Image (spheres, grey):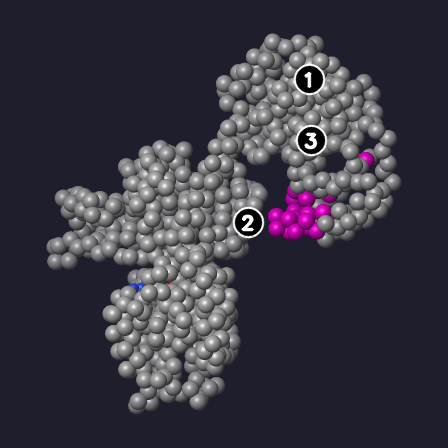
Amino acid sequence: MSDTRKLIIVSNRMPVTVEKKKGEIHFHQSAGGLATGLGSFYRSYNSIWLGWSGISSDRINRKERESITTKLANDFGSYPIFLSKKDVELYYRGFCNRTIWPIFHYFPQYAVYDKSLWESYKYVNKLFSNAVMKVAKPNDIIWIHDYHLMLLPMLLRKKLPNASIGFFLHIPFPSFELFRLIPWRKEILNGLFGADLIGFHTYDYVRYFLISAYRLLGYEHTYGQVIVGNRVIKVDAFPMGIDYAKFDKATLNPKVKREVKNIHKNVNDRKVILSVDRLDYSKGVLQKLDAFSLFLEKNPEYKGKVIFILLVVPSRTKVEHYRLLKRQIDESVGEINGKYGTLDWMPIWYLYRSLPFHRLAALYSVSDIALITSLRDGMNLVSKEFIATKRNRHGVLILSEMAGAVEELGEAIIVNPNNREEIAEALEKAMKMPIEEQISRNKIMQRRLQHYNVVKWANDFIDSLHKVKEQEQKLYAKVLTPEREDKLINAYVKSNNRLIILDYDGTLVPFAGSPEEAKPDSKLMKMLKAIANDKRNTLVIVSGRKKETLEKWFGKLNIGLGAEHGAWIKEKEWDMIAPLRNDWKIRIRPILESYMDRTPGSFIEEKEFSLVWHYRKVNSELALTRARELKDDLLHLTTNLGLNVLEGNKVIEVRNIGVNKGRAVLKWLSKKDWDFVFAAGDDLTDEDIFAVLPKEAYSIKVGLGISQARFNVESIKDLRLLLKRFEKAV
Ligand code: GDG
C-alpha cells in the first residue's frame, strides 16, 4: 500500500536516544518492538517519529539543538521534542509516573494528586502538539502512543479536524473505581476522545474505558463505537505482538550460541528459573522471591539443583517508590541466598542492569522456567519472547493472571501473584512437567504468537483506523449540509400539500423520565402552532407516549396525533388503529415487576396497549445485563400471545404485533397526493416511519448513526433550527 499521506508516530521517547558525554553528542538507536512493528509502514508511507530525545534542553545550546534536529531528521527519520529538566521532573517523573502509573496499575496508595504536576502534563502535551503541527498536513495519519500523551489526541483534533488520529495505551486501563480517583479524569477522557481509534491490549481494558466514558461523560457505545458530536470513535483491543522471527531465530545466532555455552558451563546440570523485569512495583518481584523461598522450604530436594536468575533492569530510580523497591529486592535476595546458599551453590543470581540482546536471548534459551508474577501488566512482552525462543524445545512459562498476555498464553501455568503457595506449587509442577507436554503446550502458543506478531498488530491497528474514518465519511455523506437544507426548504416553499411527521422525545426535546420534565417549551409550542396553522401543512406528531399526555400537550393545536407508537391515532377524535386486546398485560406485568424489584432505578410504565420497562437511570452495566435477560425472558413468553418486544432508547416495550409508528403514518400518507413529505425521528421506533415513506420524502434522523432516513442532523437543536425555517417560510 502506498499513500501520499504522512504517518506520524508520536511517543514519549523516540527510538533514538541522544546523549551528551564530555561535550560530544551521541546517538543510539534502540530496536524496540514498536519500531519493528512499524517498519512496514515506514516503507509504505512517508513516515516520521516524534518524541523526547532523552536529553534535557538545559544541557544544550541553540546550535546543538539545531544540529541534533537535522541529524535526527536525516539519519533517523525522527523529530525531537526538547524537554527541560523541570519538565522531566514534573511531567515525566511527576504526573506520568507518580499519578497515572500507580493508578492505572492499581496502586492508589502510591499516587499523588498535585496540581503543579498536572499543569506540567498539560504543558508538555501542548509542546508535543506544537511539534506535531510543525510537520503535519491536514490529512495525515497520526499514531500516538501511551499514557504520557493522553491529552494530545484532542489537542491535535482541534487543529487538524480531518486527520486520522489513533491512540494506543500500552499499560492497563483500570476499572472505573480506580480511574475516578484522578481529579482530572474527565480532562483525560476528553483528551483521548480526540482520537478516531483508541486501542488497548485487552478487551477488559476496553470495557473499563467504555464504562468510565459512560459514567463520567455520558458517552454510550454500540459494539465499541462511540458517536461524539459529528465524529465516530472506535474503541477496540489490539493485543501487541512481538518480533517473532527475531526470537525464533535467536538461538542460531553465533553470539547467542557462545553465550548459551557460557551459561551452561556455570549452571552445570541445574534447572534454571528466569525472571526478567524492569524495576517496578507492578511487576511483583518481591512476590516471586518470596514464593521461590517457599518453594525451597517445601521442596528441600531441589536445594543445590536449581538456580534462579533474577534480571532487574534499572528504571525510574529517581522516584521514591522505585528506590525503596530496589532496597527491598536487594534485602530479599540477600536473605534467601544467606538462608539457603552453600559454599558451592548460590540459589539466586541477581543482575541489576540491562543486558545486550544476545545475552537476554541466551538467558531465554537456557532457562527451564520463566517466572512472571506481575501484579498488573498491560501486556508483558517478556513472557511472549520466552515462548518464541523455545522452538521445538522444552521450557515452562509460569504467568500471572494479572498480565494482559494471559489472554493469549492460556497454555502457561497461570498463577495469582498474591498467592505465594500457588506460585511455589506452580514451580514444583513446572519442574516435574514431562518434556513432551512442555513442547506441545509451547507449540500452541508459538503458533498464536507467530501469527499475531508485532507487524500484524501494527497493520491491524492502522487498518482499523482507516475503517473508522471510512465509516465516519459514510455518516457524513448523509449529513444535512447547508446546501441540502436549502434544497429541502426550496421544495417546501414550492409545495402546496405538505405532510410533516414528527417524533417527540429525542427529536423535538431531550429525553426525560417523567412527562413533567419532558413538557414542550413555549418556543416549541409557538413554532408547532405556526407550522400547523399554515393551510398547506398537515402536521402529525407520532410518539410512544400515552394519548392522555399528547392530548394534554397538543390537543388544542391543529395537528394529528399518534400515541403509544400508533396504537391510537387522532385526526379529530382518538381512535384505535385496529381492534386490539390488552388482556395479556396480566401475564406480562409480573415479569416486568420482578425485574423492576431487582433493578434499582428502573420503573414500569403502563399504557393502554403496551407495557414499558424503563431503565434510563440504572447503573450502566447492570442495565445492559438486565435488559438482555428481560428481552430473552419476554421473547419466550410473547411469541404465542401475538406480542412484540421492542427495544427503544433505554426502554423495553411489549405491545401488540402490527402496531408501530409506520402503520400509523400510512393512514395519513394514503389520504392525499402529497407534494412534500417530511419526517423526523431519532430512535429505532422511528425507523418504522422512515421505512414506509415514499422515496422522494425528506426523512431525517436526529443524531449521527445508521438509519434508513435520507439525512442526518447532529442534534435536536439542528432539527429545531430547520423547523424554524418552515415557520419562517409560512
Ligand atoms: C510496557 C507495559 C507492555 C527487558 N530487559 C532487557 C530487555 N528487555 C525488553 C524485553 C521486552 C521489554 O524490554 C519489556 O517489555 P514488557 O512488556 O515486559 O514490559 P514494560 O517495559 O513494562 O512495557 C507492558 C509493553 O509496554 C508493550 O506494550 O507489554 O505491559 O508495562 O521487550 O525484551 N531488553 C534487553 N536487555 C534487557 O536487559 N535488550
Q: Residue at x 40, y 57 (%)?
A: 453
Q: Which residue is mark 1?
A: 499
Q: Are marks 2 and 1 in contact (CB under 8 Å)?
A: no
Q: Please, what is the three-letter code of the amino acid marked with disc 1?
A: Leu
Q: Nearer the viewer, residue 340 or 321?
A: 340
Quarter in which the C terminus is drawn: top right
Segment colored magenta: 609-631
The x and y percentages for residue 559 are 73, 18
The secondary element bearing badge 1 is classed as: strand
Q: Which residue is mark 2?
A: 211
Q: Residues within 10 Å of mark 3 (few under 14, many from 20)?
A: some
Q: Residue at x 51, y 51 (%)?
A: 206
Q: Residue at x 76, y 47 (%)?
A: 634
Distance from mark 2 CB to nearest ligand 1 atom below 8 Å:
no
Marked residue nearer the N-terminal end (2 or 1): 2
Q: Which image quarter has ligand 1? A: bottom left
Q: Quadrant of residue 687?
A: top right
Q: Quadrant of residue 728?
A: top right
Q: Which residue is mark 3?
A: 688
Q: Nearer the viewer, residue 498 or 320?
A: 498
Whole-number angstrom distance, CA of label 2 to CA of label 1: 42 Å
Marked residue nearer the N-terminal end (3 or 2): 2
